Image: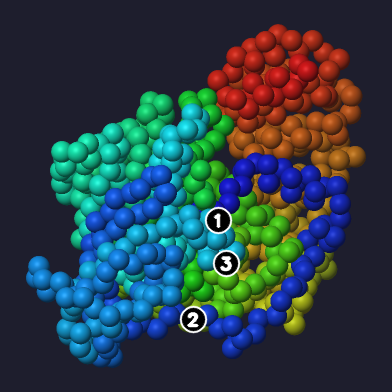
């Protein structure tokens, strides 16, 4: 699931400005909220009493009352211990009948129902080798469930009827579902447990004007002769019950293909013309992830559907991802935001989440950290590391900003409610930890380890130790220390770094202190690279930080221009490092990564009274990275009058010609605010006709 959506550069820019206008300590001091108390509220995996093998649903809808009229035929067996009981989750149903089905014959079964749990007494005690078939005729009434009591919140209704009476002229009529976490039992009887994996068949009867979508393949369609049609969807591969979905509405299907498998995009007809633009990279993404992971996309097809009023950003229902209506994009809007991160996130879940599923909500990072890291991997492959590292920075900042309010373990067995697992610790911190794991064991071991993890646990569930053991098996290394400090603890390192040169001993020196509160946060073991720039060459050294206060030194006959600690810029931490102006200038000019230039600009900002610092910001207007160009535009106000004048024409050109629309928009704003005494109307005349809404909006603001 993709819950929150951070506008990329805004967060980076906000962090940049905050960091520059206040002392770093004040901003980034950690706040410790709760201590982890194992034993209290322990939330492990659920006991598996019954195994559902297959669920068949025959479903139609009463739009007026927003009811689901269903018949569920469930094939099940005891998981291990013999039992004559079947307990199903069924939230707010009317149960019409429950029977045992043997061939076509139905025998009524006794049951009790308390509005949440349907407890069925079977005709005898079954062993784990004996399957049975239960037939349940029911009505689900999702809108009678009260948020706060029957369900956690409005987002947990399970199934939604949009514009059910058709009176709202601004919206199409739609039905769609959202199962995660335990909400699918609001529309069909099942077992709410990610460990419960089943195959399924869903026969949907709808008015013939509607299109339907569900998991798996559309097996057949039959006209019923009364204006309705029944679509039969079947998924032959087992998946968790929270991943079952359906959608109904007036959608246009744009068809695409990956190898021999169907890939398609369901949009409102008005947005069919941009469906290929928005979703068209999907086959390339499937190919890339299949190859990178060493496991081909396993599901029958891949559909993406854009619905109205969705309760989250998107949801990775197996082979049928639902996305919120911000993906209803015009060509112009696509220039400002292409939502490829959401598209890659949900697709990556089809390996991490759908194929191998976290066995409990406490282990949710096995789904969400990976999906978040999938966004990075796609950007790295498609657009290069520069672009991906901007996303890595955004994730780190999202986590750090959230960590000021709360610090919890990534894998946590003591959450108050499972919905609270969906936070920046599970997503962004977890994604950054996976990146560090990759840097720690190396690319080859990391991706081989993922292949083992996915293959070994395919169509099953996993907990965090399964990932560790796969990585240990490949690399031959013990990785308990890594998983313990990052996945099973809270917080992050606060590093105070001092670098220098001892002229007498001819030593380049590094002192690093870990200043986090060690009563609640680990003392970290951090292997990292240090790049030492000396005599026009770069020397890469590997160090292992594992003490609270640690010194490292390396022999050099002359003083290095720069000692670049954490040269891969992968360590999730808050670093405080004081460097000379000349070192910061050198860092910006010579650091190979986006993060080098970002860190250099961050350090140069407080040195803005120095000409050399301002010159770097002026040259950053032409940086190859659009995030850096935006930061440089944000600096213009700090220039001297003659300097400001000297970049005026460059900023006019940026407003007109920068390839990235958000940079053009930022340039327009800079022209209007900081060059108001100039004649900019000819620029604004042109930018008012830009294709990107952000530029048009900035121009409107400029002319006001
Ligand atoms: Zn997700």
**Which x, y percent locates residue 314?**
47, 49
Q: Which of the pair 276/420 is nearer the observer?
A: 420
In the rendered structure, are the residues bearing label 2 and label 1 in contact, judged by CB atoms less than 8 Å apart?
A: no
Label 1 sits on a secondary structure element that is: helix
Position of 681 compared to 204: left or right? right
The tag on residue 44 is 2
The tag on residue 142 is none
Q: Nearer the viewer, mark 2 or mark 1?
A: 1
In the rendered structure, are the residues bearing label 1 and label 3 in contact, judged by CB atoms less than 8 Å apart?
A: no
Label 2 sits on a secondary structure element that is: loop
What residue did someone put label 1 on? 154
Residue 308 against residue 153 in the figure, above or below: above
Label 3 sits on a secondary structure element that is: loop
Q: Which of the pair 60/562 is nearer the observer?
A: 60
What residue did someone put label 3 on? 149
Quarter the C terminus occupies: top right
């Amino acid at each position: 699931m993709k819950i929150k959506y951070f506008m990329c550069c805004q967060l980076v820019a906000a962090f940049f400005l905050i960091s520059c206008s206040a002392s770093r300590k004040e901003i980034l001091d950690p706040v410790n909220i709760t201590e982890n108390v194992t034993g209290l509220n322990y939330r492990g995996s659920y006991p598996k009493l019954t195994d559902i093998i297959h669920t068949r649903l025959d479903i139609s809808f009463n739009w007026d009352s927003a009811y689901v009229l269903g018949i569920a035929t469930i094939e099940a067996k005891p998981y291990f211990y013999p039992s004559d009981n079947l307990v199903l989750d069924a939230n707010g149903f009317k149960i019409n009948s429950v029977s045992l089905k043997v061939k076509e014959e139905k025998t009524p079964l006794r049951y009790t129902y308390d509005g949440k749990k349907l407890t069925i007494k079977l005709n005898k005690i079954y062993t784990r080798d004996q399957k049975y078939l239960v037939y349940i005729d029911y009505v689900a009434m999702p809108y009678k469930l009260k948020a706060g009591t029957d369900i956690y919140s409005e987002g947990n209704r399970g199934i939604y009827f949009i514009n059910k009476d058709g009176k709202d002229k601004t919206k199409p009529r739609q039905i769609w579902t959202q199962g995660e976490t335990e909400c699918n039992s609001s529309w069909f009887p099942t077992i709410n447990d990610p460990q419960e994996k089943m195959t399924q068949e869903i026969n949907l009867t709808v008015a013939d004007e509607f299109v339907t979508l569900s998991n798996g393949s559309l097996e057949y369609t039959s006209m019923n002769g009364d204006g309705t049609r029944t679509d039969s969807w079947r998924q032959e591969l087992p998946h968790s019950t929270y991943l079952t979905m359906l959608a109904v509405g007036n959608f246009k299907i744009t068809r695409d293909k990956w190898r021999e498998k169907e890939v398609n995009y369901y949009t409102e007809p008005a947005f069919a013309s941009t469906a290929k633009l928005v979703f068209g990279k999907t086959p390339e993404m499937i190919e890339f992830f299949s190859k990178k992971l060493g496991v081909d996309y396993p599901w029958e097809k891949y559909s993406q559907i854009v619905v109205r009023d969705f309760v989250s950003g998107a949801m990775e229902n197996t082979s049928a991802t639902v996305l919120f209506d911000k993906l209803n994009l015009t060509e112009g809007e696509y220039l400002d935001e292409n939502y490829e991160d959401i598209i890659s996130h949900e697709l990556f879940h089809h390996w991490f989440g759908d194929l191998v599923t976290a066995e409990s909500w406490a282990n949710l990072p096995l789904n969400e950290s990976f999906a978040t890291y999938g966004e990075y991997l796609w950007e790295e492959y498609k657009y290069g590391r520069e672009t991906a590292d901007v996303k890595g920075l955004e994730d780190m900042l999202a986590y750090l900003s959230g960590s000021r309010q709360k610090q919890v373990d990534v894998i946590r067995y003591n959450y108050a409610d499972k919905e609270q697992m969906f936070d920046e610790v599970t997503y962004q911190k977890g994604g950054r930890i996976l990146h560090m794991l990759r840097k720690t064991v190396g690319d080859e071991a990391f991706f081989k380890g993922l292949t083992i993890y996915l293959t070994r646990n395919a169509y099953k569930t996993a907990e965090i130790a399964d990932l560790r053991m796969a990585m240990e098996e490949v690399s031959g290394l013990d990785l308990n220390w890594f998983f313990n400090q990052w996945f099973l603890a809270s917080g992050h390192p606060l590093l105070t770094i001092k670098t220098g040169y001892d002229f007498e001993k001819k030593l380049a020196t590094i002192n690093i202190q870990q200043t986090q509160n060690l009563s609640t946060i680990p003392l970290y073991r951090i292997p990292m690279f240090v790049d030492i720039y000396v005599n026009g060459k770069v020397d890469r050294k590997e160090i292992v930080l594992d003490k609270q206060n640690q010194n490292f030194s390396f022999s050099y006959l002359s003083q290095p221009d720069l000692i670049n600690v954490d040269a891969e810029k992968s360590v999730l931490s808050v670093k405080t490092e004081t460097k000379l102006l000349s070192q910061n200038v050198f860092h910006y000019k010579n650091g190979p990564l986006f993060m080098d230039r970002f860190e250099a600009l961050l350090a140069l900002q407080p040195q803005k009274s120095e000409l050399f610092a301002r010159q770097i910001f002026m040259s950053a207007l032409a940086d190859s990275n659009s995030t850096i160009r935006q930061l440089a535009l944000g600096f213009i106000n700090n220039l001297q009058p003659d300097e400001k004048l000297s970049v005026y024409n460059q900023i006019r050109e940026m407003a007109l010609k920068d390839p990235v629309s958000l940079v053009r928009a930022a340039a327009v704003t800079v022209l209007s605010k900081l060059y108001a005494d100039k004649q900019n109307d000819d620029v604004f005349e042109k930018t008012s006709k830009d294709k990107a809404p952000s530029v048009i909006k900035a121009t409107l603001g400029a002319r006001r």
